[in-house]
């Protein structure tokens, strides 16, 4: 995909970034390399939250009430499951279940996660290429840092959904990463891209799992002069999710300066919001070029202008 755009992607922030890019670049020139550290097997089903959030958002079918899952959902399956006393802390809508049933069935038939994801993307007629960073098992594991369970390691979804990311964290690791192999075309998509974009996703639990797969960080580092990162932190806070708290809890600066410190080896430019314009010099001192513009894509007109700035 020489001359195209490759985006390192998490969930909601990356989905919005990709939706904006498709308005200024033909979708067939865009490749998203997505985090699968959030994946889980529940009720016997393989669930890939970030892949599905990107897919549903680009299809214009994301649930506006939740920010995940499909619009127009009903919850009868979960209601029945709860009646039986089954695990119901991770909500799966009735429409959304169809995706997980299909994915699980195809994986059991021997298809790879990359192949199944491609089939789902084509079924929604999205045009772009969506790649899981690896077809191998990769799980983000979180060590709790406080309370009666301090020191206990749990899965990301247990932390994020079951505990509503309300407990402090002392460590994060990516189980299976050292033995994982990049999915087909992932490294080529990075190597040949005109522009590599690090989406405004959580650096710790969305982008780091992607970079943890052997070969991916090296490929992005080699593409540094063509790489632009978009800060997920605005005025010291995350727009969605616990990115600011995680950065602080793990010893990083929860500001655009802290993000700059993390991404300086990987990207030439860091896009920061106008609210952080006074920190532009401090960002530059970390060895990464600041680009100040509006970045909150929920505001009218910002998404497209941000996409154009990222590509300029």
Image (tube, rainbow, N blue to C red):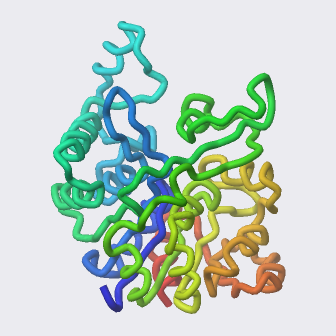
Residue at 56% across, 48% down: 140
> Which quarter of the rendering shows the N terminus?
bottom left
Front residue (pair 59, 263): 263
Residue at 35% across, 55% down: 57
* Left or right of 74 on screen, residue 13: right
* Left or right of 162 on screen, residue 196: left
* Left or right of 218 on screen, residue 249: right
Front residue (pair 113, 285): 113
Quadrant for residue 278, please give it. bottom right
Residue at 81% across, 62% down: 253
- Above or below 253: residue 37: above
From this viewpoint, is residue 174 visible?
A: yes
Quadrant for residue 224, please give it. bottom right
From this viewpoint, is residue 298 visible?
A: no
Residue 167 in percent (x, y) is at 73, 34
Front residue (pair 59, 158): 158
- Above or below 218: residue 167: above
Residue farthest along the front direction in this orientation: 179
Residue 245 in percent (x, y) is at 74, 48
Residue 64 in percent (x, y) is at 40, 44
- Above or below 116: residue 155: above
* Left or right of 38 on screen, residue 221: right
Residue at 78% across, 53% down: 250
Quadrant for residue 202, please give it. bottom right
Residue 123 in percent (x, y) is at 16, 55
């Amino acid at each position: 995909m020489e001359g195209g755009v490759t985006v390192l992607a998490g969930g909601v922030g990356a989905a919005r970034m990709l939706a904006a890019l498709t308005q200024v670049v033909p979708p067939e020139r865009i490749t998203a390399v997505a985090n699968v550290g959030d994946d889980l097997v529940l009720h016997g089903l393989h669930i890939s939250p970030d892949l599905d959030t990107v897919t549903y958002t680009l299809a214009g079918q994301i649930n506006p009430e939740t920010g995940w899952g499909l619009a127009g959902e009903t919850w009868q399956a979960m209601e029945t499951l709860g009646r039986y006393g089954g695990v119901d802390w991770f909500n799966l809508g009735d429409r959304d279940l169809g995706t997980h049933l299909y994915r699980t069935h195809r994986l059991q038939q021997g298809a790879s996660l990359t192949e199944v994801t491609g089939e789902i993307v084509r079924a929604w007629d999205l045009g772009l290429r969506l790649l899981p960073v690896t077809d191998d098992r990769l799980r983000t594991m979180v060590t709790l840092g406080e309370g009666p369970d301090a020191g206990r390691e749990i899965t990301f979804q247990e932390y994020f959904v079951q505990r509503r990311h309300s407990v402090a964290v002392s460590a994060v690791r990516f189980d299976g990463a050292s033995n994982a192999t990049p999915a087909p075309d992932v490294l080529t998509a990075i190597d040949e891209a005109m522009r590599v974009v690090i989406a405004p996703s959580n650096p710790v639990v969305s982008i780091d799992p992607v970079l943890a797969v052997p070969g991916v960080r090296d490929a992005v580092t080699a593409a540094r002069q063509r790489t632009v990162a978009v800060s997920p932190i605005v005025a010291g806070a995350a727009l969605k999710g616990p990115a600011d708290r995680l950065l602080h809890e793990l010893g990083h600066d929860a500001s655009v300066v802290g993000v700059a410190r993390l991404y300086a080896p990987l990207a030439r430019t860091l896009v920061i919001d106008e609210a952080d314009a006074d920190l532009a010099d401090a960002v530059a001192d970390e060895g990464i070029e600041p680009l100040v513009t509006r970045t909150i894509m929920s505001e009218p007109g910002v998404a497209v202008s941000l996409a154009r700035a990222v590509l300029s």
